Amino acid sequence: MREPGNAVISKGLLVHILVSAASGGCERACDHLCSYGSEVDHHIVVLGDEGVMSQVWANSGATVEHLHMLGRSRFALAKALRGRLSMLNPDAVIAWHGMAELPVILHSIPRGCRHVGVHGGNPASNLSSLTDLRYLFTEGLVFPRRCNPVYLCCSQYVADTFKRSYYLNRFQTKVVANGVYDVPDSLKHIPRIIPTNGSKVVIGMLARLDLIKDHATVIRAFAEIKREFPCAVLELAGDGDQAQNLRALTEALGLVDSVHFLGTVRQVTEVIRKWDVCVYATTHNEGFGIALAEGLMAGLPTVVTDVGPIREVCGNVEGATVIYVKPGSSKQLAEAVTRLIPDLKSRQALSLMARQHAMRHLSGRTFAKRYIQLLFPAIIFADA
């Protein structure tokens, strides 16, 4: 998606380092940068094996390779990665979090690479003191850092948590909000009149099924919503290690026939645009919420839990772009959704404001431009 004449110097090479090719927030953010950052060439090095994002990155124009080194010793990993980076001779490197291997990654980057970033997608609040000290020890005595990276935190909330970490507070930080794919008007959500005569209502949540999110509260809230709207359906788009537990909860609440686990969704907008109401329940371990931002970009009327960085994503004004409810409260979540379903005017207003907010603050192009400006300061943009 290169804009002719946008950059006035020749392309440089940006190497992306990722632990895996799973479909998570960091992996999707990497693809946003590849898709919208056409001022540079992108080469992706995955420490592990092929995954669902491997072809996605390639389709966005990146060169993708896999080292197949996870499970090997960290010394072997460092040697393999250092060898590849030396051969590639990049102008800049971005490590997409990969916290478990970060000391090894930073040790492997050649000393001559002046511009190095680390994407900070998760807060340090779930980092135990013991683990924190282990990272500090590993970097200090085993894999000394060979570069001077900047941690590019996706929210101020994430950056603030770094101050409480022995290891992470040693990094310079900058805040760059994540961006998402643009959604054309032809694919945006259009709120509809929902008849009160038993018409099907579709409620949905897009997010990985992990402990960072709070799908359990959504499922419990849905049990209450079903009392008011018996034909309601809940769609959970995403996969993760909590899938079995959430299915068990659904069964215990007698919701098996009306809660649909969609798994990993390839065509996200095609699925979520059909939802009448989007919900997003999460925890203080949330770093940003790319899936939430994708819903806003599609113009979905959304109810969210007011926790962590969510107001950075959605805006501070209550009811302007989303409806906020108390974290962990299935009662408040159910009440908000139940009020919203029959209220077409409110859903239309939320849809319009959510889309305008996302296009202004959460576009993939804005995100990519900011990253490139930080990692390639010599590039001059025509619209700067």
Image (cartoon, rainbow, N blue to C red):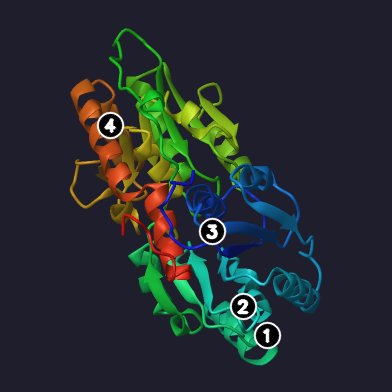
Query: Can the viewer see residue 288 in this picture?
Result: no
**Sequence order check: which comes first, mark 1 or mark 3?**
3
Whether the residues at callouts 3 and 4 have beta carbons within 8 Å, the answer is: no
Query: Is the residue marked by circle 1 packed among few (<14), some (14-19), or many (20+) residues within 10 Å?
Result: many
Q: Which mark is residue 125?
A: none
Q: Nearer the viewer, mark 2 or mark 4?
A: 2
Q: CA distance from mark 4 to mark 1?
A: 49 Å
Q: CA distance from mark 1 to mark 3?
A: 30 Å
Residue 181 in which image quadrant? top left
Q: Amino acid at mark 4?
A: Ser
**Sequence order check: which comes first, mark 3 or mark 2?**
3
**Sequence order check: which comes first, mark 1 or mark 2?**
2
**Sequence order check: which comes first, mark 4 or mark 1?**
1
> Which residue corresponds to the image point at 61% horizontal and 82% vertical from the top-left?
112
Vertically, is 38 above or below 135? above
Q: Which mark is residue 143?
A: 1
Question: Depth check: 359 or 86 in front?
Answer: 86
Q: Amino acid at mark 3?
A: Val
Whether the residues at callouts 1 and 3 have beta carbons within 8 Å, the answer is: no
Question: Depth check: 153 or 303 in front?
Answer: 153
> Which residue corresponds to the image point at 67% horizontal and 72% vertical from the top-left?
89
Q: CA distance from mark 2 to mark 4?
A: 42 Å
Residue tagged by mark 3? 40
